[in-house]
Amino acid sequence: MTRAVIALFFLALTSCSSTRRSPTSWQLADDSPVKPDAALLADMIAALDAAAQAGTNPSISKFHVRAATAFEHNGQRVVIAGGNTEYALPEAIHGETSAVNHAIVRVGADAARAKVRFVAFYSQSCGTSLGCGDCRDFMCASTQSDRLLWVCGSAADHKIRVRRFAEGLAAEERFPDATPAELGIPTADLQRLNNAVRDAWKHGISLFTSPEQHTAAAVLTAKGAIHRAAGADDAAFHYRFPVGGALQQAATAGEYAVRAVMVAGKAGAWPHIAYRDRQYGYEFSSFGQARGQLPIRLILSNGQGRYKVTTFESALPYAFSVARFNPQAIERFLRAQEPALR
Ligand SMILES: [Zn+2]
């Protein structure tokens, strides 16, 4: 993965050399989808001014993500900033996760969940993304995600645009039900996927993961190969996700064209697919689409003959992806892999 690719994993891009205007010059954009009231807008402006000054350490991408939130606590306005940090292999702590984590540090988890109403980004430009999959998981766990607002303050014109974070969520329960015939997978391949995912689910590593949380995935590639993986946790809580794991095995075999991914959990229940794992699927689906193929079918199995089917594109609305911001990077990568793709 190149530095240019890494750089594209961020919603809010801010140059060090941006000209900073008076803190009083922020204005709500006429086309802002959400119109906050005056008090909330004042908190957003205070947060944007703090975000503009936030420290970051994007040692790989060189792109700064400056985020902040603000709320009343003990009779005073509290303004809390966060910034992105990158390290070693392309890994990162993202600006929005940093800001909400700092809010927890400042007022405690319960107060932060009750009081954080928005995350504001001081941004070079306001795109459509509602954050990466991992940050969505963190926001769902740490805030009232159904009411959380996503605020972009444009460094260029000091216009503020406010959206709903929940537009980036897609609950598994709402994925469309499908009969086996509607899955678009030949019966023999469907049986192979079922066998692989049920067998994989028996294994993996569940030191801290409950049976209800434990899931597995099986991948059917365009060449007809099956790859599989089960979730694996560890003491540092650096969970290894099944969809990402199975797709990594496909990539290791040089197979970047994937037809379907089946996910299953405890028999009789619909599996939960973390947004971080959806991000891996979304990125992988963009490989096949760059070669004119259909999006990967994402199939949920309840282990008792019932299915739901969707795509990673539908399961991760307003995704942040290299495919959206730098398709040339995917083209360069796939061209280098072309012998393996044939
Ligand atoms: Zn993120």
Image (cartoon, rainbow, N blue to C red):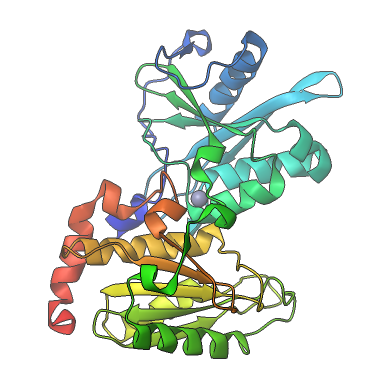
Horizontal side of residue 230 vs 282, given as left or right:
right
User: From the image, which quarter does the C terminus lie in?
Assistant: bottom left
Task: Tell which of 228 and 268 is nearer to you.
Answer: 268
Say if 217 sits above or below 104 in the image. Answer: below
Task: State whether residue 256 appears in this view.
Answer: yes
Image-quadrant location for residue 268: bottom right
Horizontal side of residue 289 vs 159, given as left or right:
left
Say if 191 sits above or below 107 in the image. Answer: below
What's the residue at 55%, 50% (across, down)?
A: 135
* Image coordinates for residue 257, horizontal then vertical, percent: 25, 74
What's the residue at 25%, 65% (across, down)?
A: 287
* Image coordinates for residue 28, horizontal then vertical, percent: 47, 13
Image-quadrant location for residue 318: top left
Q: Please, which residue is most extreme toward the right here?
A: 74
Task: Tell which of 105 and 145 is nearer to you.
Answer: 145
The image shows a total of numbered marks equal to 0
* Image coordinates for residue 162, horizontal then vertical, percent: 50, 25
Task: Tell which of 114 and 294 is nearer to you.
Answer: 294
Say if 130 sits above or below 276 in the image. Answer: above
What's the residue at 56%, 39% (across, down)?
A: 166
What's the residue at 48%, 13% (across, down)?
A: 26
Task: State whether residue 90 appears in this view.
Answer: no
Horizontal side of residue 329 vs 154, given as left or right:
left
User: From the image, which quarter does the N terminus lie in?
Assistant: bottom left
* Image coordinates for residue 237, horizontal then vertical, percent: 67, 70
